Amino acid sequence: MSKPDDPALVRAAVLQRLKVHVRLAQQGLAPTPDQRRRLAASLPELVAFGDRRYAQCHAVLDWDHRLPSDAAVLRLYLSYTDREAGAIESALKARDREIDSGNLYPEFDVPDYADVDASESYVAVLRPGNHEVGDLRFFSDWRKGVHQSVAREAVAAVRASPSYERSMRERSHDNLGPPVVIGWTPPCLAQSKHWAIEVWLLVDFDGHVGRAHVFMVDSKSHLVTREYFTEVQIG
């Protein structure tokens, strides 16, 4: 499988093998074939990290633990090897059994399909009647494993940005620390050609809540490809 096949593999999983939580199906919220096509078409181009390739994608439309549901949760569990894909399949089947055993009455809560180990995981919240992916979040256990030299180059690119200088001048006080490398971010979220490094610069923090300037730096070109501000909260 070549790298360009990664996005096609993900879309095929949504089109052909989308697992729908029973509590959504019981509410008549399982997507139709046309809605699946819209959902698959709205996905960004997902590509595996580095020189990896996706072996398989497990796509799940999950329940929000509400009746009636306010939203559905799209979960994409991406594996790099067939062995890992088998482990994900086993974990999902085990979750099926937990759900089936508890799905006796609507008043009883049942598990969802969250927290399944995978090389890469993506999550998107879909509102009722909307079968297009908007905000997509990325999770991986290895995300924070950025080599020191790569981290230094990313921070240097951030420091060279004019917007970095503006944020430094606008900081609420002088004890907010240097830019912090958060970890790897996929190209579709960084708006970059290659996998990117996410760097945060605190511009305000009172010990509990604050605000950070987020920079995405392409790991190959060392260009800042995306910036935005986000809230920071502890506790």
Image (spheres, rainbow, N blue to C red):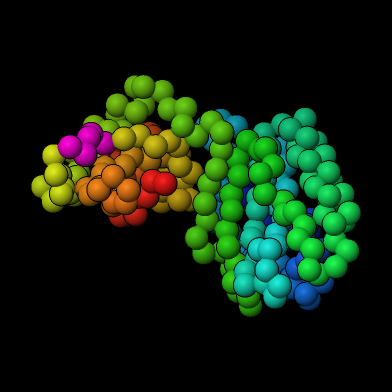
* Closer to the camera in the image, 171 or 30: 171
* Closer to the camera in the image, 1 or 9: 9
Res 155 quadrant in image: top left
Res 52 quadrant in image: top right
Res 100 quadrant in image: bottom right
Q: Residue furthest left?
A: 169
Q: Is residue 35 visible?
A: no
Quadrant where the N terminus is found in the figure: top right
177 drawn magenta: yes
- Counting from the top left corner in percent of width and height, residue 17 is at 79, 55
* Closer to the camera in the image, 140 or 44: 140
Question: Main SS of the magenta segment?
Answer: loop
Q: Against 171, is 55 above or below?
A: above
State the residue at coordinates (34%, 54%). 231
State the residue at coordinates (85%, 61%). 103
State the residue at coordinates (62%, 72%). 70
